[in-house]
Image (cartoon, rainbow, N blue to C red):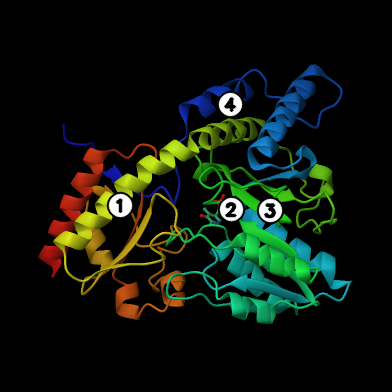
Amino acid sequence: MAPRLPIYLDHHATTPLDPRALEAMDPYLKQDFGNAASTSHVYGWRAARAVEGARESIAASLGAETREVVFTSGATEANNLALIGSARARRAHGRRRVVTLATEHPSVLDPARALADEGFDVRVVGVGRDGLVDIRALRAEVDDGCALVSAMAANNEIGVLQPIDEIGAIAREHGAWFHSDAAQAAGRLALRFDAQPLDLLSVSAHKFYGPKGVGCLLVRARRTRVRPQPILHGGGHEGGLRSGTLPVALIVGMARALEIAVSEREAENRRLAALRDRLLARLESELPGVHLNGHRERRLAANLNVSFEGVDAQKLLLALPGLALSTGSACSSAKTAPSHVLLAIGLPEPLARASLRFGLGRGTTAEQVESAADRVVAAVRSLR
Ligand SMILES: *Cc1c(COP(=O)(O)O)cnc(C)c1O
């Protein structure tokens, strides 16, 4: 049977809601609508109990303590809180430097730019051709005046996995807090907040089959005291770190989706890596001038980012109405500039403008992968 069209291959942008997460959310969208901060009646108590249950579950899934989970509207907000909040909190202690990577998501790079405007000393470290951090360059930028180092666990365009344990250890040596954007990593990689040198970790539910509009920032409460300044002021929710009424149903859905993603992670990664490798093998064997972007092994199981020599990716997308995929990050693909990630790995501009990002996911089947390969091969041939 031919797969239903268009075939969804944009799981880095977002994932569909797991029906089991929706089921867990359902009561909190209906009869149990209370405000978790209402302490004087049973509606509030029920909501608070649901939030605290979800907090325990999320903490357990990520190897954190319940008090380390700060709910946010998603990873964009968590990244802003981590960068801006940490830099401002540490300025008084003479720490004015913030170090991050050239391939970070805009929700890290833009707050870093805003911090530079506030007078912070922001250093953006480059990466190699394979997308991995230049660890010597990083070491050279991290000193005792460093407030924060921020390096993503997994890249949203080229899927590359940064050596976060090594980067965190360098930050630790200098008393800098270490933040990692784990929006693409949570539920896909084995992350243990307690066992890794992480001080702050950003998570987004809609990247692991949870609902959109919710996420969290893990904030270390053990050993080192990590305490960013809040960027949202108000009722003092979430230990004063993030004011605003909690979206109970979204939080419950996020916890359930993460439990499922973690429990199915290893089997799903094996399945997706095999499909991804099959797709790449077909593209590389059936078309000349195909370049894989990012490290061949150190990448997310479901990610493929490929440049097709001599082809404009925008035109290629138009020639592929049967595929739902993108040229790069959803956040910047509306812009016409080539991907900052592809430029950072040293790709010449024509090749950076010739690349597609394939993001496989839970709904992806072998039939879909064969159909996608047929379509891409035919479209590239006809455009050339
Ligand atoms: C999706 C994504 C974000 C933004 O997360 P939202 O919850 O959509 O705000 C941040 N960083 C990375 C790496 C992402 O993939």
Distance between mark 3 and mark 2 Cα atoms: 13 Å
Q: Is mark 4 within 8 Å of ligand 1?
A: no
Instruction: Locate residue 330 relative to residue 154 in the image: left or right.
Output: left
Mark 2 or 1, which is nearer the eye?
1
Residue type, mark 4 in image: Met
Judging by the rendered image, the residue that carries numbered circle 1 is 277
Q: Give the mark nearest the N terminus, 3 or 2.
A: 2
Distance between mark 1 and mark 3 Cα atoms: 30 Å
| Residue 332, above or below 358 | below
Residue type, mark 1 in image: Asp
Residue 256 lies, in percent from the top left, at: 58, 30
Residue 293 lies, in percent from the top left, at: 36, 67
- Front residue (pair 159, 75): 159
Q: Give the mark nearest the N terminus, 3 or 4.
A: 4
- Badge number at residue 182: 2
Could you tell me which residue is drawn at 17 percent across and 61 percent down? 285
Decide: marks 1, 4 in contact (CB < 8 A)? no
Helix, strand or loop at label 2? It is loop
- Front residue (pair 373, 229): 373
Judging by the rendered image, the residue that carries numbered circle 3 is 196
Helix, strand or loop at label 3? It is loop
Distance between mark 2 and mark 1 Cα atoms: 24 Å
